[in-house]
Amino acid sequence: MTVEHLVPHHSHPPARRRTVLLTGASGVVGRALLERLRDVEVVALVHRTPVTGPGTRSVRGDVAEPMLGLDRRTHDRLAATVDAVVHCAAVTDFNRTDGSLHATNVAGTEHVAAFAARAGAVLYHVSTAFVHTAVEGDRGRAALGYAESKAAAEETLRASGVPHVVLRPSVVIGDSRTGEIAQFQGLHRVAAGIVTGIVPLIPFDASWPIDFVPADLVADAIACVVERRIDRGEYWITAGPRSLRLDEAVEVVVDTARDLGRTVDVPRFVAPELFDRLIGPVFLDALPGTVRRTVVRMLDFFAAYLQSGETKPSSLTELEALGMRPLPDQRESLRAGVRYWAAVTGHAGRETAQVA
Ligand SMILES: NC(=O)c1ccc[n+]([C@@H]2O[C@H](COP(=O)([O-])OP(=O)(O)OC[C@H]3O[C@@H](n4cnc5c(N)ncnc54)[C@H](OP(=O)(O)O)[C@@H]3O)[C@@H](O)[C@H]2O)c1
């Protein structure tokens, strides 16, 4: 008989499962996290969109409000049970000008930090790899409000004195296998523009890296950091040196669309200065109003967030050491995202039935 057999199985009461408050649970990152978090009780702070999941409870709240918009009793009861806060809630619309970027992203983070302090919980703050984004001149300026609000949120956090970990994903695309995503992102809009032919020109350098990461990997990274009870530091959840070049990503989008039975012209890369000076004004003026607005938004998004041509820092090696699975093949993840977009939006051509 081994020693194990002599130890009664129920000699210790089972350890209480940790309780995690998850903000932004209905969003792109939050949904992937709901699927990934295990062995913890999840309390989702639901704003407008309800969520469900095994082991998940919901409370309705609003991070833009003091005490997360909860009544005192609910707030205090929650603070007494929560061990960790994963803060994903944010306004992620780059161009908002109605004050909600500040109210939700900056004041919201302050309120979440106050809650974490009250609960004695570690705060896992989801920021962005584009937090230090700056633009020269007017190009991309309209889309900068988001990055500025995320930078201010990080400052708020540092000033709060609450133990925290900052997690900085780059552009989040859908699930690496299925492409599924809670809502389509800027990158989907660009892929859509290529597939539907409204993007004949790309006014950026073909060699610039385009850093994206699938939502399931982002969730895995965050969950590993939470599970390992890391209570300080910064993690860049980015592809870094493994990012595709812009022309490689465009090739994947075009090939995938052609596989789906679409006729797609390969967009041409033109030098940014040439586009701004000569082509842009003529090209944009010729577009119908709604298409023009979509293209201008796309250009702003790209100009602000991809223009620098820099390779992002990446913490994937440290994250893998914490148990995160390796970055899946970038081309396959992008392909899955395009196929999912095409299936959902009815752009899948002859293969629609198989893909849907
Ligand atoms: N998606 C990306 O590519 C990406 C890249 C890097 C970093 N990030 C960061 O990752 C985090 C999650 O982003 P995401 O893409 O998952 O965002 P998302 O899909 O736009 O979802 C935003 C989430 O925040 C919630 N929310 C918005 N306002 C709220 C409020 N006042 N109170 C409480 N909840 C509120 C939304 O709930 P309702 O829908 O119910 O309002 C939703 O669950 C954000 O911090 C974002 O900055 C995202």
Image (tube, grey):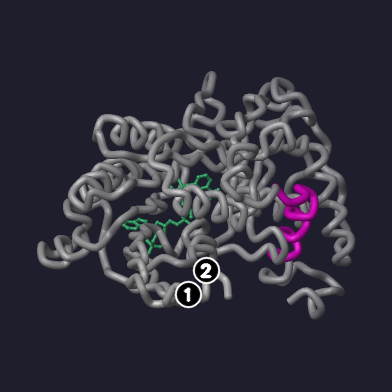
Q: Is 250 drawn above or below residue 351 in the view shown? A: above
Q: Residue at x 41, y 65 (%)?
A: 40
Q: Say if disc 1 is inside 8 Å of ligand 1.
A: no
Q: Residue at x 32, y 45 (%)?
A: 98
Magenta highlight: main SS: helix
Tell me residue 5's x, y (percent).
52, 76
The answer for how far apart the CA atoms under marks 1 and 2 are is 5 Å
Q: Say if disc 2 is inside 8 Å of ligand 1.
A: no
Tell me residue 233's x, y (percent).
44, 34
Q: Which mark is residue 6?
A: 1
Image quadrant in which the N terminus is located: bottom right
Say which amino acid is labelled 1: Leu
Say which amino acid is labelled 2: Val
Give ligand 1's quarter of the image.
Answer: bottom left
Region rendered in magenta: 327-341
Instruction: Please give the residue where the numbered disc 2 appears in the rendered image.
Output: 3
| In the image, residue 339 lies in the stretch drawn in magenta | yes
